[in-house]
Image: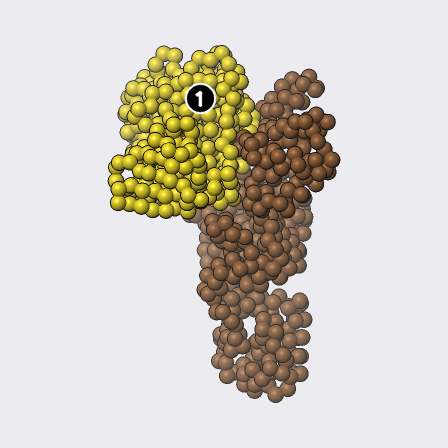
Chain colours: A brown, B yellow
């Protein structure tokens, strides 16, 4: 954008309402500027008329403030046609052949032509934070060299944390670099259903469909777990693809070894590539996500509002987006600003569905229930290992979720000495980094706390 | 502003423009309807910044002026008033409406804040007058094959263009395509009109309408039907060169009765719901029949036949929904159904000489 137009817009932006500015002045540009005439491009006929009749004086004024006083200001709608015509005149080339969209062969679902991938999921719009950067990096590596590094790639984590987004982004990226690559995205349910049809109706083409591809992406692997025959078929498909250096990407809510009914031979295969967990996003990532999503909708939220939303919605990104959309829709509908007051009024709905305040008792209770032991044991004096670890986890959660002081934590769990609490919290903090079993237990309990 | 209108006219105008009064663009005033005196008439208008629709109604004007009023409220209020005359009067930002025993005051917004309605230069534009029946038919025959995928905007409209001396309408969603020849033309036209605009125009056609006047310029189009006017932006972009997609000749042809074909397609469709609408159409030259076969794995299966005049043989798998939609807009008693093998497109057209409509459907992978 030219510096002149930028400063014109800057001056106008502060003098008109936000809605007016985004509706009319966005997507305008300075096309040409001489002493006699200034030409400004506007996005459509409505803007053209509006500028000609209503805004002309203001534009003239502001241009004059910037030292430009043309005798005439013209507003024009810039179309692709005009743009190409300009090219033709200047270069005298043959008319550009219009992009031909061949009628593609639809299969039952119109998405199938692109391997069921949703083009909206790309790496560009995935927001990376410390909770998911490993998964992101690994996915990018896979997209750059499918079938070579990290095969299979196995992503796991709770709902709404971006597993599907990442997997589809890999598929889309591969298709972008190599449009001929055969990428197939299926949910494990589809796989099971098609397999059942294959058996029951002797439908042909099942093996062809799954073996004649370059990249197989299977979502929600856990649903395959208690279906033995399907597991066996998947095992063969897996082996076939893997031996031919085809990329396999899977996701699930648990790591392979925590899916109880998964057969040993599949489990070991799932684990032979790369197994990464996608964690809950931290506060900063949640803020970044909100800002990016708001920007996509053409709205800028102030930091106060972003922080408010990010603080109050911790569990998953889908919910976060939901709250944001609700806020924007509400603000638009009522013609108000999507600020913290509106958010507070609205989030009542989101927050009332869950306990308003987490109490220490709830944390201890949920932890005990997770480990299926009586509360008395956790708060009691016994020091058996199967009791000590849950007790330490409870202390850790009291610290991390409620920011309680160590003496209080000790008190809640019937300890006299606060150093016990310090030790426990430190121990779990360390363990979370090293021991994935503990990490998962903590994550699960945390999810339950906010569920 | 002070004036008198009849309830019938005012209510009709309000409900015709009210549908457009939605605030998609983020300006609250777009939820309002503009009322403005225009000579001896009252202009009633609304816009969503993609379409602007205007109705002119006769009025007895005592004092000229203008105001904007929330669309929902005034449309519903005037709609529930008894027939007869209504007095409108604006004081400050309020509209006083009185009719018989009903008096109300609606808070409005001054008309200066309302977006300027686009105008089109009649001299420099290309114009057509098209008979209402032709227009209705051509538009409904093509909009069904337009796409609603906003990631490919050029396919979300109907492509009006001149080709070899005729004005054509064409639309495709990538899986099917339709082309309709409308009138002869000497001008050079190329415009993609959004489907929503055309639907809005269709809704504005009432029994008294005889003709639609259409005016194209480079970036906009205007439709005029009696006292109604709709101005819309055009979709920016180049429509794909679709003519190369229509096969010049086909190996297999079947001439069938349309009503019969509609019936068997509907029946076959019942059994095709599970398989995503997939129906296998087989042309049998020995029996002189076309048969449609569909399987619902859980429920059962169906084969229906109909008599046909046939050249060639073969079969093709089609989506039954696409097939029935195509049949529903083909204006003919007998039609020709043709294709070449399982992978190339299938064409449906009337057997009438010099037919003006082609409907092309891509097969499903079977």
Query: Residue at the location (56% across, 41% down)?
Result: A23
| Camera sees residue A446 | yes
| In this rendering, position of residue B194 left or right of residue A392 | left
User: In the picture, which quadrant includes the N terminus of chain A?
Assistant: top right
Query: Residue at the location (62% across, 66% down)?
Result: A436
Q: Residues within 10 Å of mark 1 (few under 14, many from 20)?
A: some
Q: Which residue is mark 1?
A: B214
Residue nearer the viewer, A353 or A132: A353
| Camera sees residue A210 | no
Query: Residue at the location (34% across, 14% down)?
Result: B352
Question: Is A343 located above or below residue A62 in the figure?
Answer: below
In terms of image quadrants, where is residue B139?
top left
Q: Residue furthest front?
A: B62
The number of numbered badges drawn on the structure is: 1
Residue nearer the viewer, B366 or B168: B168
Q: Position of residue B62 (x, y in %)?
A: 37, 33
Residue nearer the viewer, A277 or A30: A30
Query: Residue at the location (44% across, 44% down)?
Result: B92
Question: Is A66 located above or below residue A429 in the figure?
Answer: above
Question: To which chain does the residue with label 1 belong?
Answer: B
Q: Position of residue A427 (x, y in %)?
A: 66, 75
Q: Name the element at disc 1.
A: strand
Residue nearer the viewer, A208 or A65: A65
Q: Position of residue A69 (x, y in %)?
A: 70, 31
Q: Position of residue A239 (x, y in %)?
A: 57, 48
In terms of image quadrants, where is residue B302?
top left
């Amino acid at each position: 954008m030219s510096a002149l137009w930028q400063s014109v817009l800057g001056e106008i932006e502060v003098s008109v309402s936000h809605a007016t500015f985004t509706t009319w002045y966005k997507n305008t540009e300075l096309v040409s500027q001489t002493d006699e005439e200034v030409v400004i491009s506007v996005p459509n006929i409505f803007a053209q008329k509006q500028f000609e009749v209503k805004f002309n004086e203001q534009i003239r004024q502001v241009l004059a403030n910037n030292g430009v006083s043309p005798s005439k200001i013209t507003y024009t709608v810039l179309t692709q046609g005009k743009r190409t015509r300009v090219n033709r005149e200047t270069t005298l080339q043959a008319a550009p052949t219009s992009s031909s969209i061949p009628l593609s062969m639809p299969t039952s679902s119109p998405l199938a032509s692109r391997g069921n991938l949703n083009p909206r999921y790309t790496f560009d719009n995935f927001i990376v934070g410390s909770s998911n950067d490993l998964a992101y990096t690994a996915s990018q590596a896979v997209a750059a060299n499918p079938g070579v590094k990290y095969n299979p790639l196995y992503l796991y984590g709770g709902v709404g944390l971006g597993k599907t987004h990442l997997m589809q982004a890999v598929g889309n990226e591969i298709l972008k670099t190599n449009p001929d690559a055969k990428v197939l995205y299926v949910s494990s349910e589809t796989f099971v259903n098609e397999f059942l049809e294959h058996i029951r109706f002797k439908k042909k083409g099942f093996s062809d469909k799954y073996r004649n591809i370059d990249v197989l992406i299977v979502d929600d692997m856990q649903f395959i777990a208690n279906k033995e025959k399907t597991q066996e078929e998947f095992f063969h498909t897996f082996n076939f693809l893997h031996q031919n250096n085809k990329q396999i990407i899977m996701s699930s809510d648990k790591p392979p070894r925590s899916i109880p009914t998964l057969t040993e031979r599949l489990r070991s295969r799932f684990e032979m590539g790369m197994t990464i967990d996608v964690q809950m996003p931290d506060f900063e990532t949640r803020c970044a996500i909100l800002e990016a999503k708001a920007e996509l909708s053409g709205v800028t939220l102030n930091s106060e509002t972003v922080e408010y939303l990010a603080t109050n919605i911790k569990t998953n990104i889908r919910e976060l987006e939901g709250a944001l959309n609700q806020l924007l829709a509400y603000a638009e509908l009522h013609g108000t600003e999507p600020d913290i007051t509106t958010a507070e009024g609205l989030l009542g709905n989101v927050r009332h569905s869950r306990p308003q305040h987490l109490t220490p008792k709830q944390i201890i209770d949920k932890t005990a229930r997770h480990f299926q032991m009586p509360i008395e044991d956790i708060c009691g004096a016994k020091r058996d290992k199967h009791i000590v670890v849950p007790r330490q986890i409870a202390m850790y959660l009291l610290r991390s979720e409620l920011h309680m002081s160590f003496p209080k934590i000790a008190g809640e769990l019937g300890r006299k000495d606060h150093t016990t609490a310090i030790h426990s919290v430190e121990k779990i903090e360390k363990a979370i980094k090293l021991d994935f079993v503990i990490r998962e237990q903590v994550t699960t309990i945390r999810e339950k706390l906010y569920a | 502003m002070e004036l008198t209108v009849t309830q019938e006219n005012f209510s009709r105008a309000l409900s015709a423009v009210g549908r457009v009064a939605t605030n998609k663009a983020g300006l609250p005033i777009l939820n309002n309807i503009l009322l403005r005196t225009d000579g001896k008439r009252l202009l009633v208008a609304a816009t969503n910044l993609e379409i602007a629709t205007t109705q002119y109604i006769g009025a007895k004007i005592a004092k000229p002026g203008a105001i904007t009023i929330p669309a929902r409220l005034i449309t519903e209020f005037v709609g529930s008033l008894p027939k007869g005359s209504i007095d409108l009067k604006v004081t400050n930002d309020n509209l006083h409406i009185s009719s018989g025993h009903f008096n109300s005051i609606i808070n409005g917004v001054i008309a200066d804040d309302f977006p300027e309605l686009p105008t089109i230069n009649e001299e420099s534009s290309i114009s057509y007058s098209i008979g209402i029946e032709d227009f209705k038919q051509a538009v409904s025959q093509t909009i069904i094959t337009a796409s609603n995928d906003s990631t490919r905007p050029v396919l979300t409209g109907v492509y009006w263009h001149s080709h070899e001396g005729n004005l054509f309408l064409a639309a495709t969603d990538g899986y099917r395509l339709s082309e309709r020849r409308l009138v002869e033309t000497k001008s050079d036209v190329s415009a993609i009109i959004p489907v929503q605009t055309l639907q809005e125009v269709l809704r504005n056609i009432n029994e008294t309408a005889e003709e639609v006047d259409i005016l194209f310029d480079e970036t906009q189009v205007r439709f005029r039907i009696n006292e109604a006017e709709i101005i819309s932006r055009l979709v920016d972009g180049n429509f794909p060169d679709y003519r190369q997609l229509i096969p010049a000749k086909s190996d297999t042809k079947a001439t069938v009765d349309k009503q019969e074909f509609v019936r068997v397609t509907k029946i076959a469709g019942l059994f095709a719901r599970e398989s995503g609408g997939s129906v296998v159409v087989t042309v049998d030259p020995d029996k002189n029949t076309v048969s449609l076969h569909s399987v619902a794995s859980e429920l059962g299966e169906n084969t229906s036949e109909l008599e046909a005049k046939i050249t060639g043989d073969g079969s093709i798998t089609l989506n039954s929904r696409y097939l029935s939609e195509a049949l529903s807009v083909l204006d003919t008693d007998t039609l020709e159904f043709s294709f070449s093998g399982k992978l190339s497109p299938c064409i449906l057209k009337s057997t009438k000489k010099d037919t003006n409509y082609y409907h092309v459907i891509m097969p499903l992978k079977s």
